[in-house]
Amino acid sequence: MPPGLDGRTMPLQRCLVLLHGYGANASDLLLLQDELAPDWTAVAIEAPVDLGPMGLPGGRAWFHLAPSPDGSISVDMAGATQAVGQLVSELPQAVAAAGFSMDDTVIMGFSQGAMLGHALLLREHLPMRGLAACSARMIPEIMGQGGGVRDGLPVFLSHGTHDGLIPVHSGHELRDFYTSQTPAAVTWCEEPIGHGIGPQMAEALRAWFATVA
């Protein structure tokens, strides 16, 4: 790595792709990026589904969700598969337009965005420097089987223990899947909060980004 003009070593430049959750939009995670990895270049991707007609003006979704009679949430699997395909096609182009390669890029997703991050890694084997996936649901039909994950790939997983939308046991399933079925280097963080990213998680994420850089 070449020294800077003042003789000091210049930091490596990295790219952070942000995939927001249901009901948010591309700007949702940008403030968090300023706190976690302020020296990185952020590429915030906006989901294709407009939730304005459903009473959420400005809200977007990667795929539709619907309540089931038993109280669970059903997933539009066709829409989720389409969203994964769209990201596989468009995300490397967006990263290249920002001046980076996928090997210099960490994907960070929350909720729906985290589910797609898992799919990009586990099912589509998209090259990446690491994956941070917060508050995701375990959906094998979207995420695939985990083959092809490179040895030691940094993976950060987090979940709120009081999450009423996606119970923490789904986060445990993801953690156990990665540790038992892939050679990824997994960092796990849970915190007594609901569906979100709390201060303990943010601190753990800052430390994780420092090691990934």
Image: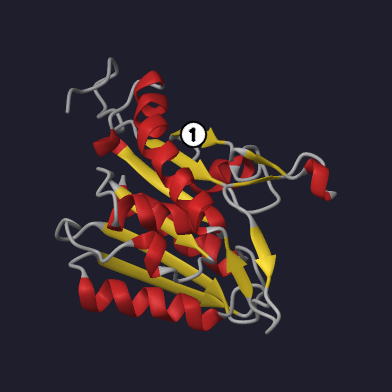
Quadrant in which residue 141 is drawn: bottom left
Considering the image in quadrants, where does the N terminus appear? top left
In the image, taking residue 47 as reference, residue 173 lies left or right, namely left
Rendered position, 136 above or below 41: below
Quadrant in which residue 135 is drawn: bottom right
Residue at 24% from the left image edge and 49% from the top image edge: 125
Give the x, y percent position of residue 163.
64, 76
Give the x, y percent position of residue 10.
29, 28
Rendered position, 128 above or below 41: below
The residue identified by callout 1 is 42
Give the x, y percent position of residue 42.
49, 34
Rendered position, 160 above or below 3: below
Residue at 34% from the left image edge and 23% from the top image edge: 96
Q: Nearer the viewer, residue 24 or 27?
A: 24
Name, please, the residue furthest toward the top. 5
Name, please, the residue furthest toward the right. 55
